[in-house]
Image (cartoon, rainbow, N blue to C red):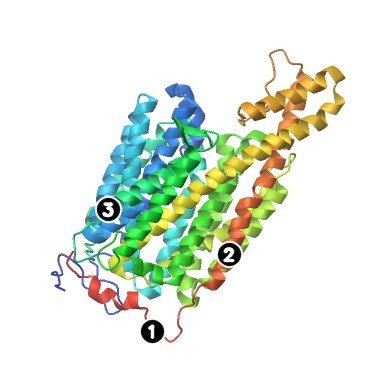
Amino acid sequence: MTTEPAAQAPKASPGGAPVLKHSPWLVLFTLCLGFFMILLDTTIVNIAIPDMIDKLDASLDQILWIINAYILVYAVLLITAGRLGDLYGPRRLFIIGLAVFTLASAACGLAQNPSQLIVFRIIQGVGGALLTPQTLSVITVIFPPEKRGAAFGLWGAVAGVATVAGPTLGGWLVTNWDWRWIFYVNVPIGILALVLAVIVMPELKLNRQHKLDIVGTLLATVGLFLLCYGLIEGQSHDWGKAWGPITIPMIIGAGVVVLGLFFWQQYANRNGEPLIPFSIFSDRNFSLMNWVVSAISFGMLGLFLPLVIYLQSVLGLTALQAGLTTAPMSLVSMVVAPIAGRMADKLGGKYILFFGLCLWVVGLSLVVYSAQVDSNRGDLIPGLLVAGLGLGCTFAPLQTIAMRNIQPQVAGAASGLINTTRQLGAVIGSAAVGALLQSQLATQLTDKATANAAGLPPEAQSRFVEGFANAASSGLEVGAGQSGAQLPPGTPQNIIDLALKTFHEAFTAAMRNTMILPLTVLAIAALSVLFVKRRKKNGTQPAGEAAASDTATAHA
């Protein structure tokens, strides 16, 4: 192993972290700034859908692709981007990703039609995928073990705030300007992060070989594309035909088969330089945390999808009001996450993570219990505050546990993998909960319509129930102020009021039943944490940390 001069790659300190020209906390701020933009973009677009439909004259299919094109490309490329960071240096990949994402954001704001916006969203996804894995790998290398939890705590606080704050910021921007500003807001943030990255980020070339696993890259890309595409598009195609005779289940099945081939190829090539070094799976904690992080994303997306609809369609809140209702959870999470990170450094992350997940389940269960037809925003706040406390206790301990024993030269691959499983969990959660919500809503609408129609004249009862049954079979509209029924023009006001009451009762019941699924997944994830191996108390460093001194200065 040859060693680069200090000017090109920082030497390792005795504690295992490299000596930097700038404070590692300034580097962390730069990483978090870029990461904040990426995560914000996964949630901020949803709130601008009505404005996009109106001003871009976009169809529902086009709107779905404006949302999903970014998520699809982002999820597919994360593993490859993480490995590229290992091979060519995370600084280079971070700067390239940041530049691509910032330019694509400006282009999205300037788009003149839905097709242009979809193309620019794809480019945004590429930039986001190049940037994201580098954040975890750099944090793992530049911070010594005793400070890593606090760093992950701040990183986790940013992740939590960005994910939940998207609807709030998006609602404010759309209300005061228009949909274009949800993209323009990225430009000044991106420029600032880019300038800081060029100045403060260290060169960390952690792998001696410049060799990319081409076969593995192709298999991973194709497999993840098919799996994510099938899950994202399944509901819009009613889980039936997608491309001619090819069905959604066939696409998902093909994705699973290709990913199976990918993992077989990776195992067969384990002594070479695979895209995912199999050595990282020998660490039980890393493998467990991949499952837990996917379950957290499943729960987060699965819970907030019906909750945001409930806030606007049942409680009648505006987009901004709905975003502000969930803001206390993100604020509590932001405050708690750094504290939880420091506690994880001192006490180990296992029981802090377990405690956090349990609190999150309890808090969200309180939210579900409090969500009634006649509830108001204040009824939901106690549960959201408890959930925010729990959420703040998850991010830092999870990353600390996952990356504790990972050797720096494969930190990018490990980071890419754990971010991919996070995205897959979100995609699967959104698809599963969306399908279950649709099914529950169709059943509940018919049941509630039948019960509420009892007070109508006999000749009107069958038409009332039939209106909801037709809506359930032909596609449900769940926007604010809508009843879900297909009511003809000139319908008497008392019938319209009864239809709205029926929809509110049906959606609330459907939401409460649907949310049992993500809550169950989160509860299982909490129990899984009990199998984590705790950190040794004798001060012995894991192999990955001991190796940092050698690998932080290796030639790529």
> Seen in the image, is 129 located left or right of residue 498?
left
Q: Is mark 3 on a helix, strand or loop?
A: helix
Kind of residue indicated by mark 3:
Val
Q: Which callout, 2 or 1, points at the residue further toward the start of the chain?
A: 2
Q: Nearer the viewer, residue 205 or 423?
A: 423
Kind of residue indicated by mark 1:
Thr
Q: Gap in Å between the C-alphas at discs 1 and 3? A: 38 Å
Q: Between tags 1 and 3, which lies in front?
A: 3
Residue furthest front as drawn? 245
Q: Nearer the viewer, residue 339 or 496?
A: 496
Q: Between tags 3 and 2, which lies in front?
A: 3
Asked if labels 3 and 1 touch by Cβ distance under 8 angstroms, the answer is no
Residue at 36 percent of width and 31 percent of height: 117
Quarter placement of the C terminus: bottom left
Q: Give residue 480's mark.
A: none
Q: Give residue 540's mark.
A: 1
Quarter placement of the N terminus: bottom left
Q: Gap in Å between the C-alphas at discs 2 and 1? A: 28 Å
Spot occupied by residue 109 in the image (x, y as percentages of width and height) = 36, 32
Residue at 61 percent of width and 38 percent of height: 309
Residue located beneath label 3 in the image? 215
Residue located beneath label 2 in the image? 526
Q: Gap in Å between the C-alphas at discs 3 and 2? A: 36 Å
Whether residue 440 is visible here, answered yes or no, is yes
**Circle 1 residues within 10 Å: few <14, some 14–19, many ≥20:** few
- Tell me if residue 10 comes above or below residue 84 in the rendering: below
Q: Between tags 2 and 1, which lies in front?
A: 2
